[in-house]
Image: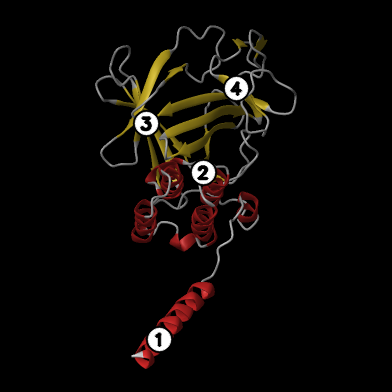
Amino acid sequence: MNFRFASVLLISIIILLTSCGKEDDLPILEIVSYESTLAKLDSLDKGGRWLANGIKEANELSSLEGDQEANITNFLNDLAIHIETRCNESANDAFINDLIAEGYPPEAITIVENAIIRVCSELNAHEGYWIENIVDPNIPFPITAINDMHIDAATKKVTIYVQTKVNGQVISPPQVEPGECTILFNGDTVCFHPNAVYLNGSGEELMQGDDTGEWWIKRIWELDGEGFLNWEAEPMQDYGEGLWVEATIIEDGVTMKVGDLDNSHTGEYNLRKPHVNNSPVTYTVTRYDANDQPQYVNTFSGCITEKSDFDGLARSCPN
């Protein structure tokens, strides 16, 4: 009996030691920082910056334990570095399901979900620095319209900064301080635009100029959510009362319908559509009246990697 007991005890000890050895052999993940991931990215990689931002949010989340933070930050870092794996839906879903099964804090799971949405959503086809060159026989100078578009697909927030330049000089919005006016080259008096914000690359929208940036017209809405009070981009002396504008996505899942959607005023709206199958990619804004009849089309035939006056960062174009 003593021999049998000793044998069983010996086998149990061997199994325990073997098991401990296997656990000790498992790699220990270290927490990844926002700065270390950002340093590995291409300067034009907006998707990578979203993932790095997810890492930053996880770094700042007090409810995460150390091994949990390491697990999440390593996952997001791997996605940031390996572009081809970012939108592997089955792998991403499996990781999120593991977090849920292992009892991770809900706010941590939301960080991962939002980072993936911000990188992989079809709405990102709108993101870009869009240029339209306009020919007007009445103006003997080159005219350029700019739509600098920023998309947050997780919140469905769309922000656009608009300018029109004539011969390289900003005409719309007028480059004057709030409450001030100026005279254009054609003699027209134009005043401060109600939607104007001052951008100097700081990542903030200012309401006073500081001679380091320019005034831009800001359009902002949340798809199927909060709209905004809009005034037309044309520079004027008196802009009137403005029009409340809302936005939604139509049936194709990518085209934005923006305007007086409840038909409470003019009933006019725009359809904003990226054409990713074109080479190069183009972007159209088509104005419709209340009877759904097209009035005119603006075609942004160029997307360029210009630095945004909002945050000083450039982005690659949709593809």
Q: Nearer the viewer, residue 132 or 248?
A: 248
Left or right position of 42 against 290: right
**Side (left or right) of 246 relative to 111:** left
Between discs 4 and 2, the one toward the N terminus: 4
Q: Specify the farthest residue to the bottom.
A: 3
Where disc 1 sits, the SS reads: helix
| Residue behind mark 1 | 11
Residue bearing the label numbered 3: 223
**Residue 158: percent from the left, percent from the top?**
45, 33
Tell me what residue is drawn at x 53 percent, y 18 percent: 195
User: Label for residue 242?
Assistant: none
Compare marks 1 and 2 and give the one earlier in the sequence.
1
Q: Which SS class for mark 2?
A: strand
Given residues 32 and 182, the one toward you in this image is: 32
**289 to 190, vertically: above or below:** below
Number of residues whose C-alpha sits closer than 10 Å to that of mark 3, classed few (under 14), some (14–19) or many (20 or more): some
Of tags 1 and 3, the one toward the viewer is 1
Viewer-nearest of discs 4 and 3:
3
Tell me what residue is drawn at x 59 percent, y 50 percent: 44
